[in-house]
Image (tube, rainbow, N blue to C red):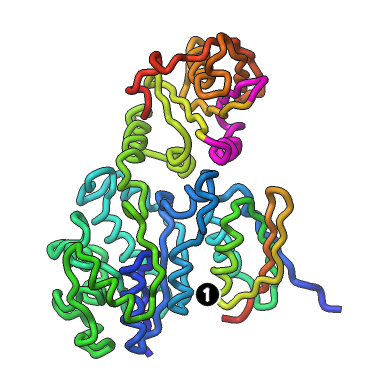
Amino acid sequence: MKKAIALISGGLDSMLAAKVVQEQGVHVEGLNFYTGFCVEGHTHAIREKHRSRPRRNNALWVAEQLGIKLHIIDVSSEYKDIVINPKYGYGQNLNPCLDCKIFMVNKALAWGMEERDFDFVLTGEVIGQRPKSQRKETMPIIARESGADDLLLRPLCAKNLTPTRPEREGWVDRAALYGFHGRNRKPQMALAESFGFSDYAQPAGGCCFLTDAQYASKLQDLWDARGERDYELDDIMLLKVGRHIRPASHYKLIVGREEGENRYLEGYRKRFLHMRTTGFPGPLALIDGAPKRRDLTLAARILARYSRGRTLPRVDVSAHHTDGVVEMLNVEPLSPTDLPASWHV
Amino acid sequence: MAQENRQRLDARGLLCPLPVIRTQERVHDLAPGTLLDILATDPGVMQDIPAWSRVHGHVVVSTEQDRGCIRITIEVCET
């Protein structure tokens, strides 16, 4: 029996692609990559308002529906180079989609074929589905640059492409593959129905934070403020949380918007100068960067503006330095009109 | 009496899917029959660890939740 490694995102296309090949008697196992920018999971885990929603890891859920093993691989440190130096550039925001796909197919190749005895790689790509990475011209680039060459099968649009080795050698029947193209989702939905799949994830705006304009703007701000295009995993996690307010280039505040975010930020409090209101409930603010002494009053006023004491004339704020020293500040909450929109990252 | 082979994985403070990834990495090196206690704080593990265990053929032996801390014990099986 031939063995295929399927890139499983948790969305419908990769689910269908794996199923189509599985139906042909091929043993399929799934790979899912954790880049650190995955939307799934983290926002649900952090934000209180998302907790009432049914929560599941869609890639694992897909694997269960297909009855296949799913291996989740942490590529977050290697992925940094893709984000910082994408050979093929970015899409609309800081999404290096083409480089990302090449990277993932290459990782699948190494994982499945060099380290294990899989025969080919399959993806749920559809020509014309995505403006940056899923175009007729990019399909051969991905195959070539990933090193997969003709061992990369796209079951959903194979009929629009040159036959791959799995098709030529009869490992799969090309006639039973598909020729989908474009952004129309109806063929996929019809195929899903024919397989009896009525429940599947349809992530709005994709599954990667790098495609999100607001997130990309925060990442760009981080790079600008630090004067270098670099990040640690904690940096990109914190960009997902709270209001980011930068009154000056050398520091910014990360202010929790709700209980779940405050709880998450608490986990970082020992590593950051942080502030909280005293005497009544309010958010936690981490101060990222190197604020000067005189900046602390403004930071405290901003924090007070988001606390329940925002309408009071003065509010007490405690500033907790990383060396353990706690400083008390008594400040006037900043009025909304004194907080320029340009400070919001 | 044979000594029970029991190991512990501390995934507290990690958000999903990292606890699942750490579990997967640890289980890779464990012999069938080993019990692995996974400690976590992200409630997402309540769904994700059992789902991961099911697709890989391992068995969730118990799940406990005490205030913010979750302990899931899985038995590593031959897969």
User: In the displayed structure, does residue A67 sit left or right of residue A123?
Assistant: right
Q: Amino acid at mark 1?
A: Val
Above or below residue A135? Residue A277 is above
Q: Nearer the viewer, residue A135 or B68?
A: B68
Is A323 in the magenta?
Answer: no
User: In which quadrant of the rendered image does the N terminus of chain A lie?
Assistant: bottom left
Image position, residue A326 (x, y; %): 65, 19
Is A268 in the magenta?
Answer: yes
Q: Residue at x 12, y 63 (%)?
A: A137
Chain letter for mark 1:
B
Indicate the quadrant where residue B63 lies: bottom right
Q: State whether residue A335 appears in this view.
A: yes
Image position, residue A223 (x, y; %): 34, 33
Dot 1 corresponds to which residue? B55
Above or below residue A279? Residue A97 is below
**Magenta-colored span:** A258-280
Q: Nearer the viewer, residue A99 or B52?
A: B52
User: In the displayed structure, does residue A174 sit left or right of residue A261?
Assistant: left
Q: Residue at x 56, y 25 (%)?
A: A273
User: In which quadrant of the rendered image does the C terminus of chain A lie?
Assistant: top left
Say what secondary structure mark 1 lies in: helix
